[in-house]
Image (tube, helix red, strand yellow):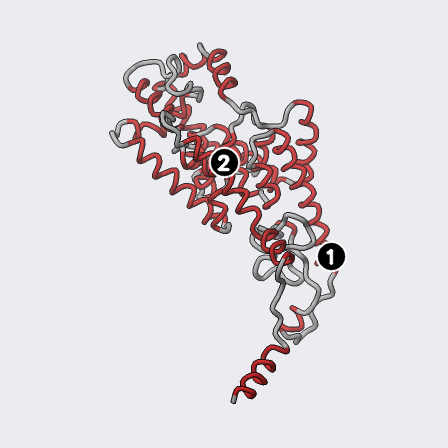
């Protein structure tokens, strides 16, 4: 009986492939999950700083400024854990929260819900919720967490009212309707907003903005590199990368708006508060976009599927190393359908897994 069991076990084990083990397993596992650990480590650092005693949320600055304006005072004259340096139109979305006694916590809930919505709308793996710029936006209850989901859900005009830089991807992508609506709202509400005080103090407000900014966009000597990279990566990606790369006086949480364009390697770079890493992310996206275009060209050169060929015959043919949308294979592939894999390991390009 024991001998029969042994023989049966040996028979089952002959064709069994245990897969990689030891150091190869560790390397393969790390290659697949390193981006998640990178995000987690950086986000833990920022959450530690935000949780320090006496720290204020980003929302507090906006709420205090809005309440001062509602009381007939100048929102830019006195700091509260930082200077309010946004244009007057930003006060409008904050009014409902400013008049509620629990507005601060409601803003926090809205910011966290916006972060979750962003990941779902972009169909990203859930560990992308730890993308540090997004984490900072959510933990600080900042308006920046709203911007991307509002644009993706077709309410870009409201995103522009919250942050003017939201107009950049809309303009580059040719979405003029939300820009026109935002312009109309700005004109209609102009008499009730303190634009006069804003322009009268504009040099001082800009100085406060520069003092508080991390200034992570491309410096002047790297600006040509960033611009060339944006041109190479194409409009679909450059529209989302333009703010991190070129917008003046940026903060790390501004990089949240770049999520639709990012690959894992580019996101890992853009999670670091450094202008060099911002330019590096642009270069990585440009190179990877060219790689995608080459793969797309090879796909188009494949012979058409013979009539009556089975699905097995089609799937046995050489396939590109990037993810294709359903129905795009074969013969109907377009360059804009190609997307870098976000959750598969791609041995052809270091850092593309994640």
| Residue found farthest to the front | 2
Q: For mark 1, does the 10 Å Cα neighbourhood hold few (<14), some (14 to 19), or many (20 or more) residues? A: few
Question: Residue 86, labelled with which disc?
Answer: none
Q: Secondary structure at mark 2?
A: helix
Question: Residue 298, labelled with which disc?
Answer: 1
Q: Is residue 335 left or right of residue 53?
A: right
Q: Is residue 244 above or below residue 32?
A: above
- The residue carrying mark 2 is 133
Q: For mark 2, does the 10 Å Cα neighbourhood hold few (<14), some (14 to 19), or many (20 or more) residues? A: many
Query: x, y (%) of residue 18?
Result: 60, 68
- Tell me how many marks there are: 2
Query: x, y (%) of residue 350?
Result: 67, 49
Query: x, y (%) of residue 93?
Result: 36, 30
Q: Secondary structure at mark 1?
A: helix
| Residue found farthest to the bottom | 1
Q: Is residue 14 above or below residue 301?
A: below
Q: Residue at x 38, y 12 (%)?
A: 77
Q: Is residue 233 left or right of residue 127?
A: right
Instruction: Locate residue 307: give its quadrant.
Output: bottom right
Q: Residue at x 45, y 49 (%)?
A: 120
Q: Nearer the viewer, residue 60 or 91?
A: 60
Q: Residue at x 61, y 29 (%)?
A: 275
Q: Tell which tag, 1 or 2, sits nearer the viewer.
A: 2
Of mark 1 and mark 2, the one earlier in the sequence is: 2
Query: x, y (%) of residue 271?
Result: 55, 37
Disc 1 versus disc 2: distance between alpha carbons? Answer: 36 Å
Q: Residue at x 61, y 41 (%)?
A: 266
Q: Is residue 292 above or below residue 220?
A: below
Q: Is residue 259 above or below residue 211?
A: below
Say if mark 1 contacts mark 2, CB within 8 Å: no
């Amino acid at each position: 009986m024991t001998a029969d069991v042994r023989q049966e076990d040996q028979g089952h084990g002959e064709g069994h492939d245990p897969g990689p083990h030891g150091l190869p397993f560790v390397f393969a596992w790390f290659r697949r999950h390193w981006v998640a650990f990178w995000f987690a480590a950086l986000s833990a650092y920022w959450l530690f700083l935000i949780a320090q005693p006496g720290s204020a949320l980003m929302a507090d600055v906006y709420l205090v400024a809005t309440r001062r304006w509602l009381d007939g005072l100048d929102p830019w004259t006195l700091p509260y854990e930082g200077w309010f340096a946004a244009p007057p139109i930003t006060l409008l979305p904050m009014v409902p929260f400013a008049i509620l006694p629990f507005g601060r916590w409601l803003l926090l809930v809205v910011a966290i819900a916006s972060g979750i919505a962003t990941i779902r709308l972009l169909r990203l793996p859930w560990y992308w919720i730890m993308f540090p710029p997004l984490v900072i936006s959510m933990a600080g209850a900042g308006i920046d967490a709203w911007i991307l989901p509002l644009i993706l859900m077709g309410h870009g005009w409201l995103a522009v009212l919250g942050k003017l830089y939201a107009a950049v991807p809309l303009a580059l992508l040719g979405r003029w309707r939300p820009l026109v609506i935002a312009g109309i709202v700005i004109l209609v509400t102009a008499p009730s907003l303190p634009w006069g005080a804003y322009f009268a103090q504009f040099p001082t407000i800009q100085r406060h903005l520069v003092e508080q900014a991390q200034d992570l966009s491309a410096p002047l000597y790297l600006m040509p590199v960033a611009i060339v990279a944006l041109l190479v990566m194409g409009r679909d990606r450059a529209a989302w990368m333009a703010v991190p790369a070129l917008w003046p006086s940026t903060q790390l949480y501004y990089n949240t708006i770049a999520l639709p364009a990012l690959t894992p390697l580019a996101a890992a770079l853009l999670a670091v508060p450094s202008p060099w890493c911002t330019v590096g992310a642009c270069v990585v996206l440009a190179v990877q976009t060219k790689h995608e275009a080459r793969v797309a060209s090879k796909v188009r050169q494949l012979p058409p599927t013979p009539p009556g060929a089975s699905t097995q015959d089609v799937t046995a043919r050489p396939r590109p190393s990037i993810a294709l949308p359903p129905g795009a294979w074969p013969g109907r592939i377009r360059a804009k359908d190609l997307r870098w894999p976000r959750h598969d390991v791609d041995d052809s390009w270091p850092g593309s897994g994640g």
